[in-house]
Image (spheres, rainbow, N blue to C red):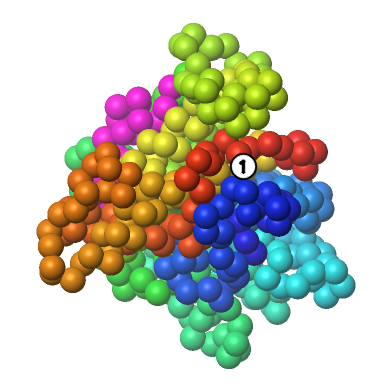
Amino acid sequence: MRYFNYLTAEQERALFHSPPVSFNQKTDQALLACAVGAALYMPATRPDVPEDILKLREAGLVTAIMDLEDAVGDGEVNAAEEAVVRHLALLSAYLDRDLDAGELPLLFIRVRSPEQLERLIFRLGSLITMLTGFVFPKFSVDNGRAYFETVAEYNRLRVSGDPVLYGMPILESAPIIYRESRLDSLLAIRGLLREYREYVLNVRIGATDFSSLFGLRRSPDISIYDLTPIRDCISDIINVFGRVEEGYVISGPVWEYFSGKNHRVLRPQLWQTPFEDTFGKYGKEMRSHYISSAIDGLIREVLLDKENGIVGKTIIHPSHLRPVQAMYTVMHEEYVDALSIVESNDGSRGVLRSEYANKMNEIKPHLNWAQRILLRSQIYGVLHEQQHFVGLLPENEYTHV
């Protein structure tokens, strides 16, 4: 897989100073964790999951999560498990006939319980190698060890050469959001995850469940960071898991809106200039479409995610794919700053002027930031000096599945 694979070679040369690298299930864990990116949830009971994955792959889909939890009714669980097996079998047949293994998006299944995880690993048999991992909802120390011990046991027994199977816990339960139990819960989870660090791909934030506990739901005008109980909890999650020495990639909460039927109150949150400078009249129309579909709110929230060190987001509609992915590209200015900081980290000096002559770069304080930028630049690429993420946004028919 490779980000922005829908671009022609000419378009890629025009947009990127340094293009994204290719990756697959066997890629180094640090790079693979960053590559999960915009993860599209699909109800496992949806009959066209394999076809949708293959079509959306042409529009840039990199990560798909088949959902057996909240998107599936309690009475549909058995049928949903059977559907997952069928979906993977059909995708496997496509691989045998039409695709190389590295061309398929990263695939995950969100399970309901450790018991279901164990049952699915058994039922899938050799199809398990189609998966990059499983997603664990409402993760806690009470269920977490059972989840990761099952993953660890699979990896201990897997056939040599098969890809590692990863787990991605979702932090979304009451003991984490409630202030009186939050710190103890987060520290206990951190201690547990340290035991299984080699199998933890992302730490994911489930703000919809958090909001439910307070009877809240944000409007399309509002970022999740504007809901104060959720913002405070996200802050503590980043404080515990986002430290450089922990090395976890934290994935941001879902953005729920995608329709043009939302009632807006506040002013649009996208400047007109980048769109018009990039695409002229078409750019103006694109901006209007994003505003009417509340995508401007999504873009603002991804900006806030990035500023807080979050890389990745749960998405629930194909129209979210390109805005989220485009936002993770590295600007040329960021890249040259990061590169100069890392290359100057030899003790010869402590501070230097930015190549853009608009800021100072301090070697020691900015080194960790620079290393993260260079990691992200491998997966999402570095844009040319005069390019903007807007250049990656034009859509085609596949984003309307």
User: Where residue 51 appears, x then y in whole percent?
Assistant: 81, 53
Report the residue at 35% width, 30% height from top: 225
Q: Nearer the viewer, residue 107 or 302?
A: 302
Query: What is the span of residues highlighted in magenta in the rendered image?
Result: 222-244
Q: Amino acid at mark 1?
A: Leu
Q: Residue at x 51, y 31 (%)?
A: 298
Outermost residue, top side:
265
Q: Position of residue 71 (x, y in %)?
A: 63, 43
Q: Position of residue 291 (x, y in %)?
A: 58, 20
* Outermost residue to the bottom: 160
Residue with the mark numbered 1? 392
Q: Residue at x 53, y 20 (%)?
A: 272
Q: Which quadrant holds residue 247?
A: bottom left
Decide which of 26, 40 is in the foreground and name it.
26
The foreground one among 186 and 280 is 280
Residue 66 is at least partly visible in this image: no
Image coordinates of residue 389 in percent, x first then y, are 54, 40
Which secondary structure class fits the magenta region best? helix
The front one of 219 and 43 is 219
Identify the image quadrant of the C terminus: top right
Q: Is residue 169 left or right of residue 54?
A: left
Instruction: Indicate whether residue 225 is drawn in magenta.
Output: yes
Classify 373 as above or below 299. below
Q: Secondary structure at mark 1?
A: helix
Q: Is residue 50 above or below residue 126?
A: above
The residue lying at 32 percent from left, 56 percent from top is 338
Is 44 contained in the magenta span?
A: no
Residue 17 visible within the image: yes
